[in-house]
Image (spheres, helix red, strand yellow):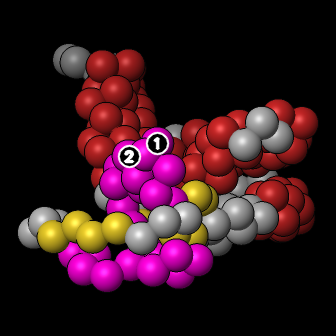
Amino acid sequence: MVKILKSGMSELALESSLVKVKAKVKKEFKIDLPSLDFKEVKENEVIEVPLWAAQILAEKSFIEDEKEDFFLEIQKALITERLQPRTQLAELRKDFFVKARIFIEALKRYNKYMEAERSLSSLFDLFSLRLSKLLQLASSLALPSNIDERLTKEEKEFMLKVRSVIEDWRKEILEVKV
């Protein structure tokens, strides 16, 4: 089962590297590639760039992360989740965990370890709370009709795989042979 989950998660990791992030240009540069087209980027301009490219450009000191405070969004999500009944998930944006991970990595890059730990702690609480709800929902025979709009991409992948494993196990355990 772990192998099944890992294959889906590696696809999500690849997908998350394609997520666009905001960055502030530190020095002018030009890039003309099929997947990236920055003909004339000026200093102090804010651009959107795929995460994989942002990491390379930041390493070379061409850009710096646009430091949006995602901690407040994590806190809001955690409070909203706690207010939901045990069998109901609060709605999260589809890229919530990807954006949270990018935010925490940026904090660490800028040596803001206390803020990173505080954000990570809240994120872990939210993850644990949602995981327990996901497992409860996955084992139910029928899912709520609005479940898809409440799941992140990672949670949707997890839910499909766990439901499949539970269903196989349920059939194996409850199957009566005459």
Helix, strand or loop under label 1: helix
Q: Which residues are magenta?
A: 37-63
Q: Decide which of 109, 86 is in the foreground and name it.
A: 109
User: What kind of residue is marked 2?
Assistant: Ile
- Does the magenta segment cover residue 178? no
Residue beneath disc 2: 56
Q: In this rendering, is residue 141 above or below 127?
A: below
Q: In this rendering, is residue 105 above or below 146?
A: above
**Residue drawn where x is 38% and y is 46% of the image:** 56
Q: Are the residues tagged 1 and 2 within 8 Å (C-beta)?
A: yes
**Residue drawn where x is 78% and y is 64% of the image:** 69
Residue beneath disc 1: 59
> Which image quarter: residue 162?
top left
Q: Quadrant of the N terminus?
A: top left
Q: Decide which of 118, 131 is in the foreground and name it.
A: 118
**Residue drawn where x is 30% and y is 19% of the image:** 3
Q: CA distance from mark 1 to mark 2?
A: 5 Å
Instruction: Say few, some or many: other residues with alpha carbon within 10 Å of mark 1 (under 14 / 14 to 19 / 20 or more).
Output: few
User: What kind of residue is marked 1?
Assistant: Glu
Tell me where residue 26 appears, x and y as whole percent.
Answer: 55, 64
Helix, strand or loop under label 2: helix
Tell me where residue 71 appears, x and y as whole percent.
Answer: 81, 58
